[in-house]
Image (cartoon, rainbow, N blue to C red):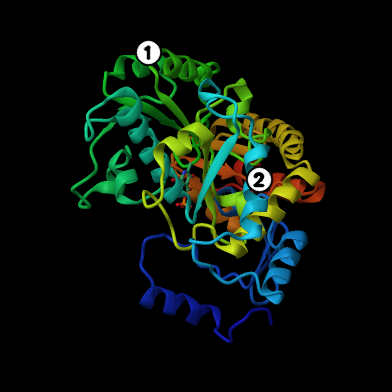
Amino acid sequence: MIGLTDLKDIDAIELDQKYGAHHYNRLKTVIRKTKGAWLYTQDGTKILDCLAAYSAANTGHHHPKIVAAMIKALQEGMASVISNVIYTDVKSRFLEKLCTLLPQLGTRFGESGNVAMAKNGGVESVETSIKLMRYYGYKNKGIPDGKQEIITFSNNFHGRMITIISFSSAKKYKEGFGPLTPGFVEVPFGDLDAVEKAVTPNTCGILVEPMQGEGGMYVPPEGFMKGLREICDKYDLLLTADEIQVGMGRTGKDFAFQHENVIPDVVVLGKAISGGLVPLSVMVTNAYLMHMAFSPGSDGSTYGHYPLSMVAGNAALDVFKEEDLSEESARKGEYMKKQILDIASRSEHVKEVRGKGLFIGIEVNNGDAMFFCRQLLDMNMLANDSHGHTIRISPPLIIDDSEQQYILERLERVLAGKQQFVAK
Ligand SMILES: Cc1ncc(COP(=O)(O)O)c(C=O)c1O
């Protein structure tokens, strides 16, 4: 028997249903252990994790190097939360590694390096970036406080707190949760003309996912990020790239904005940044911008620079570089996409295959990706839908050849095989 409690699966589900919020449609599977690309149930059944917690488990589950660093921190007394009014060496080490991993951001503001602020969940760092863009508009552009506008995109996903859902295109995310936060203007994703038309004297920034994960696994038209950069330079706006899902190697580059050699002013990272072992997110920007916007008291978070997160983040960044995960993602993704396109060519169910690196979406004709994901789970492979209509293929970047075959065999059976599933 595997697991940390004596709860049977049926009891674990019942207790969760009774005491937990019902804010996810959960598949009826209980996980007791995870390792590498695999999830284990109580009887030892192995399920291949083709979702990787929406890119949080890019380095695989329980990467030994990250786990060892965390155990050491716990054993040597450097894991407990420490008041933010003093320094820790582990924070300094992590910040230096992170800030020098990224290219110099916001180059028009000088080359004095990047500076980062850490939070917990990704949504917190997105909100921090909104504060930064608004303050820039107020302080540097003279926009009256309260009038700042930020351009966002249709189908965006940046998290679920009030300000963030305020500019979501999904009615479901915001209905009944008002009053919502004003100051956001939505334009179609990929439409540069619409972006330029939306700029007003009160616009202070653009918030974009360089590729949309939750919105349906969309890669924007070529030149989109470059065009956004040009608009930001022309109208003195800050360009913020939300790389929480598509950064850290997921799309075959360290960061998705690098597909177009564009340098944003602000980058937001989360999920994989701590190796999937503890919550951590960061906002990174040019030193000038960070110090212009934030002074003592203007921001903060109790667990924002939590030592155990700093240790995990530090080790995860080492693993990311040592194992060349961006290159691994590019190579494996190219192979997988080619094979999936081949399956699609023999399938009556597939509308489109898209993505880069190990960020691959398979849009299905019946618009119900979960219909296929449930069949995949029956074959011990975890995948889920993106935006209802697209099967998300985003396994840990460390998957090996046999694990890639495992995924492809199951996609073949579900989408093109003799074993026919009747789509709704
Ligand atoms: C692009 C993007 N931004 C922000 C978030 C929110 O991150 P979190 O759920 O850690 O708050 C997500 C989560 O899926 C995301 O994909």
Q: Position of residue 35 (x, y in %)?
A: 72, 63
Which comes sooner in the sequence, label 1 or label 2? 2
The residue under the point 23% across, 38% down is 182
Residue identifier under label 1: 193
Closer to the camera in the image, 287 or 244 = 287
Q: Residue 153 at what x, y percent from top left?
A: 38, 30
Place of residue 352 in the rendered image (x, y in percent of width and height, measured from the top left): 55, 29
Task: Please state which of the two labelled residues, at mark 1 or mark 2, is closer to the viewer.
Answer: 2
Q: Nearer the viewer, residue 301 or 411?
A: 301
Q: Residue at x 75, y 46 (%)?
A: 404
Instruction: Kindly identify which numbered label has been placed on residue 40.
Output: none
Provide the secondary structure element on which disc 1 rests: helix
Residue depicted at x 67% and y 77%: 43
Mark 2, Cα crowd under 10 Å, few <14 / some 14-19 / many 20+, is some
Q: Which mark is residue 96?
A: 2
- Say if 119 sits above or below 265 in the image: below
Look at label 2 and name its amino acid: Glu
Q: CA distance from mark 1 to mark 2?
A: 38 Å
Which quadrant of the structure image shows residue 215? top left
Amino acid type, label 1: Asp
